[in-house]
Image (cartoon, rainbow, N blue to C red):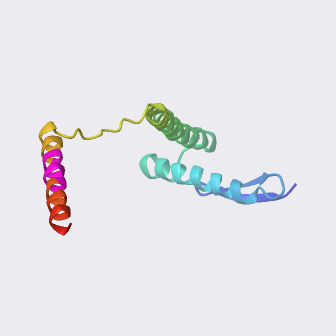
Amino acid sequence: MPEVTISIGGREFEVACQGGEEHFLRTAAAMLDAEASVLLGQIGRMPEGRMLLMAGLMLADKTAGMEDSLRAMQEQLAEAEAALAAARSAPVKVEVPVIPPQLTETLAEIAARAEALADKVEESAS
């Protein structure tokens, strides 16, 4: 098991971890160190246990807030997916324009005139 030296609040710690997990340990330690640095900047020197406890609690608070936000986003996503599924399953409404009766009558009249002209042309040609 590899051992990694991490620094939190200006103090060095030797921590063992699984092989290949060193990067994750360093990342977590950096997050904890950032919180510890804020505490030390506000309060000053404090016992190691208290510093680690307070920094851990601050991280836990941030994590809880992020989990609440994530849960709300997941609910919104579920609602949007449900609305999309409902929209996809609803029948598609297609509107077909209605031909006004005047247009039909006008076209019939034009057709009748065209036939009459054709008849006249035939009579004169024969």
Left or right of 62, for residue 98: left
Q: Is residue 121 above or below residue 35?
A: below
The foreground one among 32 and 89 is 89
Q: Is residue 28 above or below residue 86?
A: below
Q: Position of residue 98 (x, y in %)?
A: 23, 38
Q: Position of residue 114 (x, y in %)?
A: 17, 56
* Quadrant position of residue 102: top left
* Quadrant position of residue 79: top left
Left or right of 22, for residue 100: left
Magenta stretch: includes residue 55: no
Q: What residue is at 51 percent from the left and 36 percent from the top?
A: 74
Left or right of 34, for residue 94: left
Which residues are the magenta region? 107-115
Q: Position of residue 123 (x, y in %)?
A: 17, 61
Magenta segment's dominant SS is: helix
Q: Quadrant of the N terminus?
A: bottom right
The foreground one among 48 and 89 is 89
Q: What residue is at 14 percent from the left and 60 percent from the top?
A: 120
Most distant residue in the right direction: 1
Q: Position of residue 19 (x, y in %)?
A: 84, 57
Left or right of 92, for residue 124: left
